Amino acid sequence: AQSVAQPEDQVNVAEGNPLTVKCTYSVSGNPYLFWYVQYPNRGLQFLLKYITGDNLVKGSYGFEAEFNKSQTSFHLKKPSALVSDSALYFCAVRPQAAGNKLTFGGGTRVLVKP
Amino acid sequence: EPEVTQTPSHQVTQMGQEVILRCVPISNHLYFYWYRQILGQKVEFLVSFYNNEISEKSEIFDDQFSVERPDGSNFTLKIRSTKLEDSAMYFCASSTGGRGPGELFFGEGSRLTVL
C-alpha cells in the first residue's frame, strides 16, 4: 500500500526567507508525485508534479520540488517566501504501474510572517 | 479556466437522513473521484469512477455510500443514512486519465455537518 509522510505539522518562516516543506513517500515501483495547496475554506489547488526525467520540478507561484529516489523524498521549496504563501500544503503519491488512487500526506501548515 | 463545481457548499442534516452531494467535473475529463477531509485531518480517498462504474474504492466507502453519473455532466455522492462521523468536507475531483500522470482537479468542497 502506498503512503506519504509529512513530518512537520507546521513550518514558520519569515517573508523573504527560503521555504521548505518536507515529504517522504512509500509506493510499489515508480511514483507519480504531486503537491497541492489549500487556502482557508477552499479546495485543493495543484502546484506541481513529478512524472519522470529531471529530478527538479518547477511549478506554480515560484514553487519547485526535488525528487530524490534514494531517499524516497519529494520536498517542496520556494527560494523567497511571501505572506500570501501561508496555507496548508499536501504531498500526494500514486504508483505509475497500477491503480488511480491518489494518496495524500497529512498536510503541513505554512505560516509566513512579515 | 475550466473548473470542478460542487453543490451544496454546506449542508446540515440529521443523523440517519440521506444526503446527495453533487459535482460537475471538467467537461473533457474521464475519471472522477470523491475524497473527504475530516476537520483537521488528512485528505482521504473514497472512490474513483470511470466509464460509468467504480474503478477503485477505499474501506471507508461502505454500503452506505454510492456514486452515480446520472447524465453527461453530473457526478453524485449519496450517503444513505448519515452518521455523526460522516461530518467532513467532501471534495470531488476529475482528471483526464486514471493511471497516467495527469493531476486531479478538485472542486471547492461540500461541507457536511451531521447532527
Image (cartoon, coloured by chain):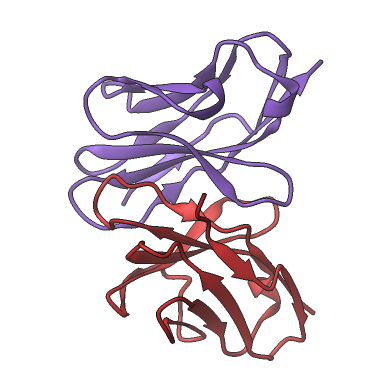
Q: Colour of chain A?
A: purple
Could you say where residue B101 lies in the image, as x and y percent from the top left? Answer: 28, 44
Tint of chain B: red
Left or right of A37 on screen, residue B114: right
Instruction: Indicate the quadrant where residue B49 lies.
Output: bottom left
Q: Residue sitting at 79 percent across and 18 percent down?
A: A113
Count all numbered tags in the image, as a single digit. Answer: 0
Examine the rendered structure and indicate whether residue B45 appears above or below residue A47: below
| Left or right: where B14 falls relative to A77 | right
Q: Position of residue A75 (x, y in %)?
A: 45, 24
Nearest the eye: A31 or B75: B75
- Is B61 rendered above or below residue B2? below
Residue at 52% x, 78% y: name it. Answer: B77
Q: What residue is at 46 percent from the left and 30 percent from the top?
A: A23
Q: Is residue A45 toward the left or the right of residue A112 in the image?
A: left
Residue placed furthest toward the front: B1
Q: Which percent across, then down, holds residue A104? A: 47, 47
Between residue A78 and residue B37, name the one nearer to us: A78
Identify the residue at image location x=52%, y=85%: B64
> Which quarter of the rendering shows the C terminus of chain B?
bottom right
> Relative to B63, does residue A72 appear above or below in the rendering?
above
